[in-house]
Image (cartoon, helix red, strand yellow):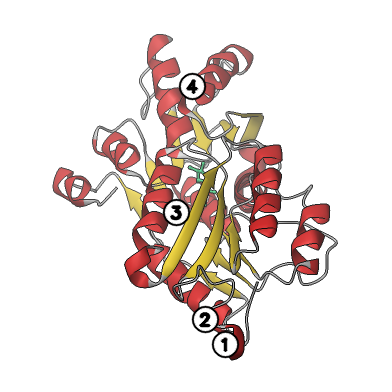
Amino acid sequence: SSTGDEGAQAGSGGDGAITVGYSQLGAESGWRTANTESVKQNLTADKGFKLTFVDAQQKQENQIKALRDFVAQDVDVIAFSPVVETGWDDVLQEIKDAGIPVVLVDRTVDTKVSDPFVTHIGSDFKAEGTKAGDWVKQNAPDAKIFELQGTLGSGAQVDREEGFDAVVGSQVIGKASGNFTRAEGRTATEAALQAYPDMTMIFTHNDDMGLGAVEAIEAAGKKPGTDIQIVSVDAVRDGLQALVDKKFNYVVECNPAFGDQLAELIKKVHAGEDVPKETVVEETTFDQTITQAQVDARPY
Ligand code: GZL
């Protein structure tokens, strides 16, 4: 738990290190892998941390168990990226009662617990949806769009859909979730190609599902990026390669590499210093003018 100066050593991993319990939601996508890398590269012993990192395989019950274990271990700070927005009230109250500060990472929570976390760092998912919608409005105003949604009930899915649909919702002819994975993106697209034969575009909530959609579109004898355009979010290297290969048409970046900013936030939270309620990470967009050299230079 957070300590005063007299307790600086107690409960802080003994050697003055800040003990951090980190509940990562899974390893479902290239984005998540890069995010985990960034967290592990920055919450290191030589930077003053003692990190307990637990992967939940996209199961909320696994996250709740990990969070309860962190309370039992009386870590100094808890950081977590919630797989979905709701269902956290009990465990967030237990963490609050234990006096352990929470740093919310990436995805968001919807809870009735008052003041459940000290600070959040992540993307503005609604802005990402809006950017995708704006491109479609400009470049494909007659597109008939199938929306390939992320994990239903996750902040990323809810807000990307809200942002996108606010701009071009009238062009959306169908929706289904691919749970942010390549395999489920492929099966959802196979079904959508049957259900919506007049679709001309897919808006996918992440690159991994979009790459699964490419496989389904090609298996159906159609050309991704031409017969069926693809607008995606994340901008991991495989997604940007699809852009160079003209299989994707537009990619909105979602930046996973904020481990350094997270480390600074956790240090301030542990020290009881003021931190902003929200840190929105920087991110841009990419279209087919991207070069192979730019893709090769991407760190993840
Ligand atoms: C967004 C993150 C999403 C990514 C997906 O910040 O939560 O989850 O867009 C990942 O690739 O699965």
How far apart marks 2 and 4 lie (CA) works out to 40 Å
Q: Are marks 1 and 2 in contact (CB under 8 Å)?
A: yes
User: Is 92 positioned to the left or the right of 179 in the image?
Assistant: right
Whether label 4 lies within 8 Å of ligand 1 gets the answer: no
The residue under label 4 is 183
The residue under label 1 is 273
The residue under label 2 is 268
Whether label 3 lies within 8 Å of ligand 1 gets the answer: yes
Which of the two labelled residues, at mark 2 and mark 4, occupies the earlier sequence position? 4
In the rendered image, the vertical position of residue 5 relative to residue 291, given as above or below? below
How far apart marks 1 and 2 lie (CA) works out to 5 Å
In this view, the mark in front (1 or 3): 1
In this view, the mark in front (2 or 4): 2
How far apart marks 1 and 3 lie (CA) works out to 28 Å
Q: Which mark is residue 254?
A: 3
Task: Inspect the image, locate mark 2, and give the three-letter code of the amino acid beneath it.
Answer: Lys
Give the SS element for disc 3: loop
Estimate how packed mark 4 is, as few (under 14), some (14 to 19) or many (20 or more) residues with alpha carbons within 10 Å.
Answer: some
In the rendered image, the vertical position of residue 271 relative to residue 151, given as above or below? below
Residue 111: x and y in percent read 80, 58
How far apart marks 3 and 2 lie (CA) works out to 25 Å
Residue 7: x and y in percent read 60, 83
What residue appears at the point 52 percent right and 37 percent down from the top-left corner?
203
**Whether residue 84 is visible:** no
How far apart marks 4 and 3 lie (CA) works out to 21 Å
Q: Which mark is residue 47?
A: none
Q: Depth check: give the residue in front, 57 or 210.
A: 57
Q: Depth check: give the residue in front, 54 or 80.
A: 54
Q: Residue 169 appears in which quarter of the rendering?
A: top right
